Image (tube, rainbow, N blue to C red):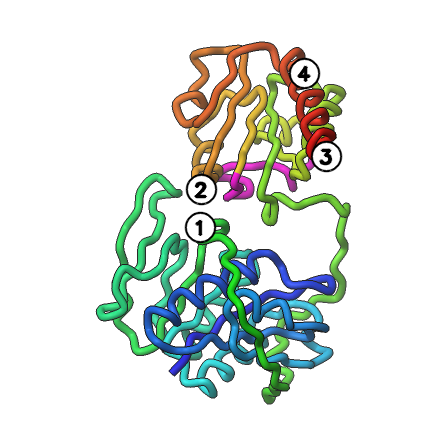
Amino acid sequence: MSVVVYTEFEEGKFKKTALEVASYAKGIANQMGTSVIAITFNADDTAVLGNYGVDKVLNLKEEQLNTFVASAFAKAIAEAAQAEQAKVVVLSSSANSNYLAPLLAVHLKAGYASNVVALPTSTDPFTVKRTAFTNKAFNHTVISTDTKIIGLSKNAYGLKEHEGAATEEAFSVSLGEDDFGVKVENVDKATDKVTIADAEIVVSAGRGLKGPENWEMVEEMADILGAATACSKPVSDLGWRPHSEHVGQTGKPVAANLYIAIGISGAIQHLAGINASKTKVVINNDPEAPFFKAADYGIVGDAFEIVPELNEKLKAFKASNS
């Protein structure tokens, strides 16, 4: 019996979400009195996983798996889980993991709970807390199948370091042409900036900035904070910013530790996309803007005065603490 965790490896390093799901898997393993086995694909160095509670790494080296193919990845993870007699498999809530989780559930005849935000409240019956209704509520779900699959929400558990080292074993599976029905021919990265999906801090702006020519101060704040930039739907519809930055129910969800909204009134569709973020800061000159009801901190005032001043204060703070 073990807990198996899928750790995503990309561009020569493990993603932050991989370390978070490893931390979470260690928490479950402690509850169940068992060990954590990680499976990864074509990783160069797996030592860091030991720092987050992984006892053993199955490193599958297969050139065909250099790019993500859900059917092949699901089959490989299923074989690893069966080989290790796993009772629990933990995945992140990345786009790739959300895609492969149902396929994995079919392979393992397992129950799958997505959007999980905490360790199980009970392992018998196996009960997890999840978000529901686009993060407006929580529910407690009992998974009754012999094998359980958990999709952990981003930033819900955090990184928890442990003293220890992981051993590494080679692992192989028999993959055929049928496992590669969909092939990725190339992956183009538009920029080297922090992506919304992986960002711990997101600086977002809306029509209150009046035009794309005023985004320089938003990008400056993002650079200072090491944050990703984002925008509301009207802004991307107007072509002021790329659609890849559109946050909301019809755009990308954000689960950042800090979400700063500048000149965004707070339509319900936008709020649904950022509800999972932990701390929300709003800057708006309209004190009646709906976003203030959802915010942890709010500043009522002109963004063109407040943001530049905040940027100067942030730069001074960084300089004095470097």
The residue shown at (43%, 77%) is 35
Circle 2 SS class: loop
Residue behind mark 1 = 156
Q: Examine the rendered structure and indicate whether residue 236 appears above or below residue 111.
A: above
Circle 1 SS class: loop
Look at the image and tell me whether residue 239 can be seen. no
Nearer to us in this view, 234 or 45: 45
Residue 221 is inside the magenta segment: no
The residue shown at (52%, 61%) is 161
**Are circles 2 and 1 on residues that touch, CB within 8 Å?**
yes
Residue behind mark 3 = 223
Which of the two discs, 2 and 1, labels the residue nearer the N terminus? 1
- Give the side of residue 192 with respect to residue 74, left or right: right
Report crowding for label 4: few under 14, some 14 to 19, many 20 or more residues within 10 A (C-alpha).
Answer: few
Q: Which mark is residue 37?
A: none
Query: Residues in magenta?
Result: 239-257
Which of the two discs, 3 and 1, labels the residue nearer the N terminus? 1
Residue behind mark 4 = 309
Residue 17: x %, y % from top left: 55, 57
Q: Residue flagged by tag 1: what amino acid is it?
A: Ala
Which of the two discs, 4 and 3, labels the residue nearer the N terminus? 3
C-alpha span from label 3 to label 1: 25 Å
Which of the two discs, 1 and 4, labels the residue nearer the N terminus? 1
Residue 294: x %, y % from top left: 41, 27
